[in-house]
Image (cartoon, rainbow, N blue to C red):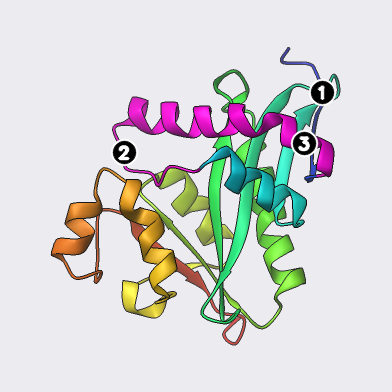
Amino acid sequence: MEDERIIVRPAIASDVVFADQIIHEMESSAIARGSGISKRSAASVIEKIDNGKAIVAITENGEWVGFSYIETWDNEKFVSNSGLIVSPQHRNQGVASQIKTQIFELSRTRYPLAKVFSITSGSAIMKMNTRLGFEPVTYAEIAQESAFWDSCKSCVNYDVLQGKKRTNCLCTAMLFDPQLN
């Protein structure tokens, strides 16, 4: 398995078969880490794949390895890089970094004027974001659209976010501003 080649690429229509695996691994991983994560539905993952807003990693034999997607907010002023997950048997092989780089490039290609943001509680994602030019920011500097914040409702830390009036939470907001880079 370790020697099997992993392909990281834009998701295609046939990748919708991985939707259940993706959402299951997102939830399992969050529980194992004891961290908050917004739950995604299989339908939302399929929608991202169908709309060309996802990156997938698979083995050359067609086994699912990893996933991430983008979404726009505030009339395309912002684009979020979200849902980065790698299957446990393929972690610590650089796959997450490859996916992160490609999802960032997809964001920049599709929405070159948009500010790109990511919110995370994981140090590995923070390090990847920093290498790509992201900087930590306050929540006031990222998308303010209610639908974005509503997607946090399924996170175990939602009460913290609401208690702080959406000004901060346990996640770190990171932003890439194309005007500054």
Q: Which segment did they paint magenta?
A: 12-40
Circle 2 — which element? loop
Residue 106 vs 84, above or below: the answer is below
The location of residue 8, given as percent across then percent down, is 77, 40
- Which numbered disc, 1 or 3, marks the residue that appears first in the sequence? 3
Q: Is 13 inside the magenta-drawn segment? A: yes
- How far is mark 2 from mark 1, CA to CA? 30 Å
Q: Distance between the residues labelled 1 and 3?
A: 10 Å
- Residue 12 marker: none
> What is the crowding at mark 3: few (fewer than 14 residues within 10 Å), some, or many (at least 20)?
many
Front one among 8 and 30: 30
Q: How crowded is mark 2: few (under 14 residues within 10 Å), some or many (20 or more)?
A: some
Question: Which mark sits nearer the N-terminus, 2 or 3?
Answer: 3
Answer yes or no: do the residues labelled 2 and 3 have beta carbons within 8 Å? Answer: no
Where does label 3 land, which residue?
Answer: 15
Q: Nearer the viewer, residue 179 or 86?
A: 86
Which label number is shown at residue 62?
1
Q: Which of 58 and 132 is in front in this view?
A: 58
Image check: 65 left or right of 14? left
**Could you say which quadrant of the image residue 21 lies in?**
top right
Label drawn at residue 35: 2
Which amino acid, by three-letter code, is at mark 1?
A: Gly
Q: What predominant SS class does the magenta segment belong to? A: helix
Query: Is 66 situated above or below 111?
Result: above
- Residue 99 lies, in percent from the top left, at 67, 45
Cβ atoms under marks 2 and 1 closer than 8 Å? no
Can residue 98 be spotted in the picture?
Answer: yes
* Residue type pointed to by label 2: Ser
Around disc 1, counting alpha carbons within 10 Å, would you say few (fewer than 14), some (14 to 19), or many (20 or more)? few
x then y, percent, for residue 118: 48, 60
In percent of the image, x 25 and y 69: which residue is there?
166
